Amino acid sequence: MDDTFRDADAELISRVRQGQTSAYAELWIRHRPLALSVARHTDPHGDPEDPVSEAFTSVYVVLRAGGGPTTAFRPYLATAVHRSAIRHARARASLSLAVTLDEHSLDDPDALPSLDRLAVRETLAKLPPQYRQILVLMLVHGYDVRAAASQLGISYNATTILAMRARNRFRTLWHGDQLPFTRP
């Protein structure tokens, strides 16, 4: 990266510290492709948008508080994205245990009729592991967003978004799978 680019980043960082959010938007536009590349490289099986958003948010908070880089924004952001992507990958891996959707609740004959248990299992199996994980934590184990965020090692906002995406994807798959049947 040439010195002109670095100088422009230094100016934008200074403006961010002064409260100019438009300066951070410029940094975001300039460095988002790099951030997505780092996220994809670090966690090739994950959605790069979540760690990138989380990293940009955390860097913004640090800059507004007067910390972080003064000139070298790009490597600072790349490190933040890398760490965030690792947290997301670990969270996905750690919950592949609960991903089978707490077999005890699905095997409980009083919980669901057997046909519905099978349909739930099949639908869950189609979800990405991170979506299954958040659904298990929140719907089976009764975690609230803060507890799930703590368990997953990701931010409250990222957990909220993840839960929303997981529910929406499950709903879409469920309705798609159930179309030939009539459901009350």
Image (cartoon, grey):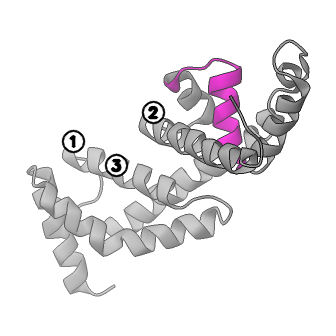
Q: Is residue 12 left or right of residue 152?
A: left
Q: Which residue is mark 1?
A: 65
Q: Is residue 12 magenta?
A: no
- Residue 130 shows in the view: no
In the rendered image, the quadrant that contains the C terminus is top right
Please provide percent x and percent y for residue 124. Answer: 76, 42
Q: Is 34 displayed left or right of 120 in the figure? A: left
Residue 54 seen in this snapshot:
yes
* Magenta-highlighted residues: 127-145
Residue, disc 3 = 57
Specify the label residue 156 is tagged with. 2
Q: Nearer the observer, disc 1 or disc 2? A: 2
- Quarter-wise, where is residue 80 in the image? bottom left
- Point out the tag, 1 or 3, that comes first from the N-terminus: 3
Residue at (24, 77) in percent of width and height: 6
Q: Residue at x 65, y 33 (%)?
A: 135
Labels 1 and 2 touching (C-beta < 8 A): no
Q: Amino acid at mark 1?
A: Ala
Most extreme residue toward the top is: 110
- The secondary structure that dominates the magenta segment is helix
**x then y, percent, for residue 152:** 61, 35
Badge 1: residue crowd in 10 Å (few <14, some 14–19, many ≥20): few
Residue drawn at point x = 77 percent, y = 49 percent:
180
Camera-side residue of 3 and 182: 182
